[in-house]
């Protein structure tokens, strides 16, 4: 047994579903899944019901997270077509602004240039007065994070460049997209990007086998696109799961009547680390690659401070099959079910207190904190 100690991981892209979809996940179940996966910080997306688009809705989420979370949470605000600019007063208390410009779960998709232009310009004005958050400027604002596929990617790259706004491209999946982002980085654009484990380890060939359990946005990509993620690994700042739980019934599994449009999205926070450790065993990654993209990369991109006295212990040689029944997420399944993996989280210590040990959650309720709340409210 080889036990290694790592910093607590950061999952910079999750959907904890509260408020509005608590039957899929909530701040307690989602953070329990995080601890089981060695994750001690999660950044939570705004496509809840209602979407996190106003200061009141943002602080409602802060209160929910504070009451229930077992690990630390950063909360995104989201751009909508209705509450335009309403989030700007809490820009400094959010981990960033999320804009959906491509097909996704929920109703937050933005397709008009006039709106996109407005969102980038408004965020840039906040950035000009507060600066962007970093270790040197903890009171700044975070980046704009975009779900931007295909031709929406160069649109967002151009707006970010024109307004000098840091842009983080979530879940990249195509060869053309990562090649373009790499080119933009080489040209000095303020852009960073992430890739999910499911887009690193599954392809269109798995999509047929998995059916609705392999359906997410962006969809699983062709083998050549997946190969491009690995070829351009150095261009990725973050591994993040896009943990997006839906129930098996919603996915049309175990129900008698066919489900017309199963919602896209798959859970992932508690399977990321074993999948990555398995890739280390296969010689495709190093442990340093994991630390860089699950800890230091997200800290840099979002200006997340290190958590004191926080670490995880991982038995990197433990080999076992991932099982739906072992999942802590409320929905109780994983697209990687029955796959043999290496790497078991043995213990998680958060701020000096054991939060997870021997397969069990031991964190006291509400031990998680919400990030960036000491920040100025404009
Ligand atoms: Zn997402």
Image (cartoon, grey):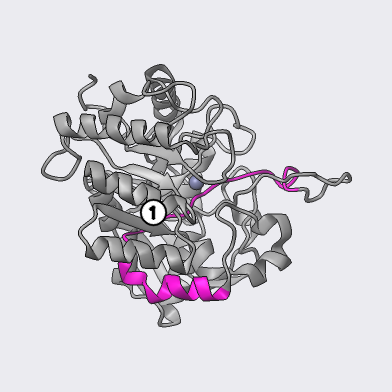
Q: Quadrant where the C terminus lies?
A: top left
Asked whether the viewer can see residue 78, the reply is no
Query: Where in the figure is residue 309, as x and y percent of width and height?
Result: 23, 48
Q: How far across and how far down the image is residue 79, in percent? A: 43, 31
> Which residue lies at the image location 58% right of the left edge and 70% below the top edge?
222
Give the residue at x 52% y 49%: 243
Residue 180 percent coordinates (x, y): 36, 63
Q: Can I make out residue 128 in this image?
A: yes
Residue visible at 32% across and 32% down?
A: 94
Of 24 and 213, the residue lying toward us: 213
Is residue 232 located in the magenta-colored stretch of the structure? yes
Q: Is residue 114 left or right of residue 190?
A: right
Q: Within 8 Å of ligand 1, the CB of disc 1?
A: no
Image quadrant in which the N terminus is located: bottom left
Would you name the residue on which mark 1 appears? Answer: 154
Q: Residues within 10 Å of mark 1 (few under 14, many from 20)?
A: some
- Residue at screen point 39% across, 26% down: 62
282 relative to 56, above or below: below
Residue 364 included in the magenta stretch of the image: no
Closer to the camera, 230 or 351?
230
Which residues lie in the magenta part? 223-251
Q: Is residue 375 left or right of residue 67?
A: left
Helix, strand or loop for disc 1: helix
């Amino acid at each position: 047994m080889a036990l290694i100690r790592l910093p607590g991981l950061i999952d910079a892209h999750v959907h904890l579903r509260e408020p509005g979809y608590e039957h899929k996940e909530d701040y307690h179940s989602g953070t329990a899944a995080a601890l089981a996966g060695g994750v001690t910080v999660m950044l939570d997306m705004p496509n809840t019901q209602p979407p996190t688009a106003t200061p009141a809705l943002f602080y409602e989420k802060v209160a929910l997270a504070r009451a229930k979370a077992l690990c630390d949470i950063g909360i995104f605000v989201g751009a909508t077509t209705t509450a335009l600019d309403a989030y700007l007063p809490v820009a400094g208390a959010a981990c960033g602004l999320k804009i959906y410009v491509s097909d996704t779960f929920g109703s937050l998709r933005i397709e008009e240039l006039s709106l996109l232009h407005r969102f980038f310009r408004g965020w840039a004005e906040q950035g000009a007065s507060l600066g962007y958050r970093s270790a040197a400027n903890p009171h700044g604002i975070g980046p704009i994070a975009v779900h931007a596929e295909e031709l929406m990617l160069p649109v967002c790259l151009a707006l970010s460049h024109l307004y000098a706004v840091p842009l983080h491209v979530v879940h990249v999946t195509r060869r053309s997209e990562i090649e373009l982002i790499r080119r933009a980085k080489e040209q000095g654009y303020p852009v960073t990007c992430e890739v999910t484990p499911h887009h690193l380890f599954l392809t269109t060939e798995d999509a047929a086998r998995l059916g609705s359990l392999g359906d997410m946005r962006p969809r699983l990509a062709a083998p050549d696109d997946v190969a491009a993620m690995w070829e351009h690994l150095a261009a990725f700042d973050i591994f993040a799961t896009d943990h997006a739980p839906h129930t098996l019934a919603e996915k049309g599994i175990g129900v008698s009547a066919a489900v017309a449009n199963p919602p896209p999205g798959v859970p992932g926070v508690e399977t990321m680390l074993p999948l990555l450790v398995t890739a280390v065993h296969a010689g495709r990654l190093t442990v340093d690659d994991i630390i860089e993209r699950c800890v230091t990369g997200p800290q840099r991109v979002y200006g997340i401070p290190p958590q004191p006295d926080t670490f995880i212990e991982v038995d990197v040689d433990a080999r076992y099959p991932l099982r739906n029944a072992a999942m802590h997420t409320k929905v109780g399944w994983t697209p990687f079910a029955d796959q043999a993996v290496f790497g078991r989280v043995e213990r998680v210590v958060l701020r000096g207190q054991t939060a997870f040990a021997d397969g069990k959650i031991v964190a006291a309720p509400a031990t998680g904190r919400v990030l960036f709340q000491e920040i100025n409210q404009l």
